[in-house]
Amino acid sequence: MSDIYNDYSYKRYKRPFRRRLFPIAVVVLTLGILFFIANLMFGFISFAPGATKVSIPTVTFYVAESESFSSKSDAIEQATIIKSSGGSGYLLVDSGQWVVVREISNKEIVSGKKYTTAQKDLKLACKDHINAVAVLLESFSTTFDRLCEYIEKFEHDVTSQNEIANNARLAYNNLIELANQFENTPGTSNDPTCAQIVVYLTRQLLGLNMVWMEGSSDNFAHVLKNAASWVIFALFDLTNAL
């Protein structure tokens, strides 16, 4: 009797389960296909070997403007005057106007305008690049903070020009070494994001080199402020370019 009952139970319940299994499998398969198509369109997950992301750190800085001009030639003329008085003289394009930067700082400036670089996640082609890219991106804010510190110390006669120039030389050499290691990493030359970073890294190097090579300048305050402008706007422009 029990054998007949068990056989009946098997036939009665197993077959309906099999019939239910098929539509479940169809639904799961359909959802999987839809997710795969959505991922290809919107990039939720990258299936490239070793693909990864790195974030550009946000940096807040303050700019004391001299004047704004619709004409570039007028802005250049004013920038020359600002440079001669020890100001930055950097030209910034803001809302279609040529702005002459008088002073730039990582600290709030009275009547200065606040800027913040945008935070972005960069998609790299190879995970082997993530650490090198993170270090290079961080170097922009580190160098900017260092130059702002030099400006403050120099204005208060805390540090000599020679000492600042020597420190800038050391920072320049360290950055050159990082850049060389980065460029020698296999695959970076074929990664468009890495290529963009190298282009703007050159502007950071020029800022440090400026301080180093003009350490005996009679207008050293301008040299420091202009270098700080070069570095922070290199990061600003890099963020907008990527």
Image (spheres, rainbow, N blue to C red):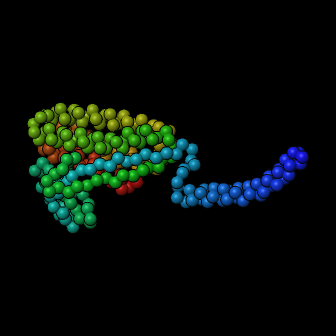
Classify residue 19 by image quadrant.
bottom right
Q: Residue at x 20, y 57 (%)?
A: 113
Classify residue 80 by image quadrant.
bottom left
27 left or right of 146 in image: right
Q: Residue at x 15, y 61 (%)?
A: 67
Question: Residue 88 appears at what percent x and percent y?
Answer: 18, 50
Question: Residue 21 appears at what percent x and percent y?
Answer: 73, 55
Res 173 visible: yes
Question: Does 68 sit above or below residue 158?
Answer: below
Q: Pick the residue in front: 35 or 121.
A: 35
Q: Residue at x 32, y 49 (%)?
A: 58
Question: Does 109 sit above or below residue 74?
Answer: above
Q: Residue at x 70, y 55 (%)?
A: 25
Question: Residue 186 appears at what percent x and percent y?
Answer: 50, 38
Classify residue 145 by image quadrant.
top left
Screen quadrant of the C terminus: bottom left
Q: Pick the residue in front: 1 or 30.
A: 1
156 left or right of 224 in image: left
Res 102 visible: no
